[in-house]
Amino acid sequence: MMQLAHPEYLWLFLIYVPLIAWYILKHRNAHAPLEISTVAPFAGLRRSMRECCLHGLFLLRLLTIGCVIIILARPQSHDNWRTSNTEGTDIVIALDISSSMLARDFKPDRLEAAKAVATKFVAGRESDNIGLVIFAGESFTAVPMTMDRPTLTNYISSIETGMIEDGTAIGDGLATAINRIKDGKAKSKSIILLTDGSNNTGNVAPVTAAEIAAKYGIKVYTIGIGRNGMAPYPTQNIFGRIEYVNQPVVIDEATLKSIASVTGGRYFRATGNNVLQEVFEEIDQLEKTSMDIRHFSHTEDNYMLWAILALGFFTLEIVLRQTWLRTIP
């Protein structure tokens, strides 16, 4: 953000008024007198371009003065640390990126639909510390707790299946999310766990992770993503190509409901893009708590451009005055 350290110096631009008045008075009758019987032979003559451009020298002088005044006012890019009190909460999004998330009962598929809704959710929670955990056959923290929305949304957009070993380790994903959020300063801590399957691998049982979350006062909102019945899942044929084959949708809703119940959260079933959006909108109504947030800002003088312009205008005036626009006293 640009600002002036001494904006009061802009009052110096008032010097333009007497300078312009002086210039007009000086040049109003500055033409050399020549007494002749008639001026009729000169009536059709036009003023030369050089004569018109003489006034440009004065304009260059005004521009030079203007640049110097702006330099005196010290244009700056301003940043600093400041602390503000706002309403916010700590949230971790735990996102399943197993290969089954490529099922196309959502448009274009479950993973892309989840990424789009999560991105919109993150953008709307400006006062919250938000982290991101991804899991499949294993889990890891993709983005630690942060208020840096661009970094978070950029990472969400880059998520793909295959980034980690395949599988569905719901318990591990939840445990990693707990480790990220448990030491947060906000009184309200929540985890949004989104998966489309059943726990089939990992070192931590989902219910055990839920009990740990409850001890830390962390609410877990679980979302089972997938429509009822059959859905087109990606499979590899004998030629190594990906084909989509309708298979039954299997979500361990009992476990997801238990996780939410133990932690004081809620379970949601998302059966389509619009329903998934509505789920996140409902979660967006999470309770908030007062928290102090520090913002960093740095101040740096940015006068170099104006100094270059001042030098350029002044040099151009001197060159023109001594060459093409030179006058004889």
Image: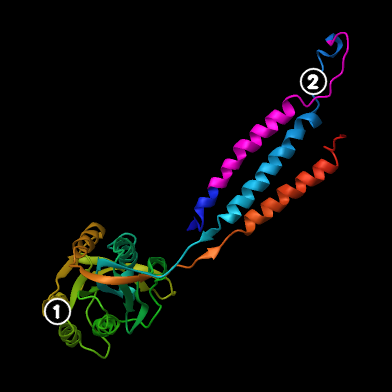
- Mark 1 residue type: Thr
Residue 88 or 130: which is nearer the viewer?
Answer: 88
The reply, left or right, for residue 77 in relation to residue 71 is left
> Looking at the image, can residue 318 be seen?
yes
Residue that numbered label 2 is attached to: 46
Q: Which residue is pictured at 88% across the width and 12% down the height?
A: 36
Residue that numbered label 1 is attached to: 263
The reply, left or right, for residue 184 in relation to residue 268 is right
**Which callout, 1 or 2, points to the residue nearer the camera?**
2
User: Can you tell which quarter of the image residue 264 is in?
Assistant: bottom left
The percent coordinates of residue 312 (x first, y second) are 72, 51
* Residue 77, above or below 40: below
The percent coordinates of residue 38 (x first, y second) are 86, 8
Q: Which residue is pictured at 65% across the width and 47% down the height?
A: 65
- Mark 2 residue type: Arg
In the image, residue 95 lies in the stretch drawn in magenta: no
- First along the sequence among labels 1 and 2: 2
Residue 112 or 36: which is nearer the viewer?
Answer: 36
Q: Which residue is pictured at 17% across the width and 83% down the height?
A: 210
What range of the chain is rendered magenta?
11-39
Report how far apart the C-alphas of labels 1 and 2 lie in the structure.
Answer: 90 Å
Mark sitting on residue 253: none
The percent coordinates of residue 306 (x first, y second) are 63, 54
In the image, residue 15 lies in the stretch drawn in magenta: yes
> Is the stretch drawn in magenta largely helix, strand or loop?
helix
Point out the image quarter for the C terminus: top right
Q: Residues within 10 Å of mark 1 (few under 14, many from 20)?
A: many
The percent coordinates of residue 318 (x first, y second) are 79, 46
Q: Are marks 1 and 2 in contact (CB under 8 Å)?
A: no
User: Can you tell which quarter of the image residue 116 is in?
Assistant: bottom left
* Residue 291, above or below 171: above
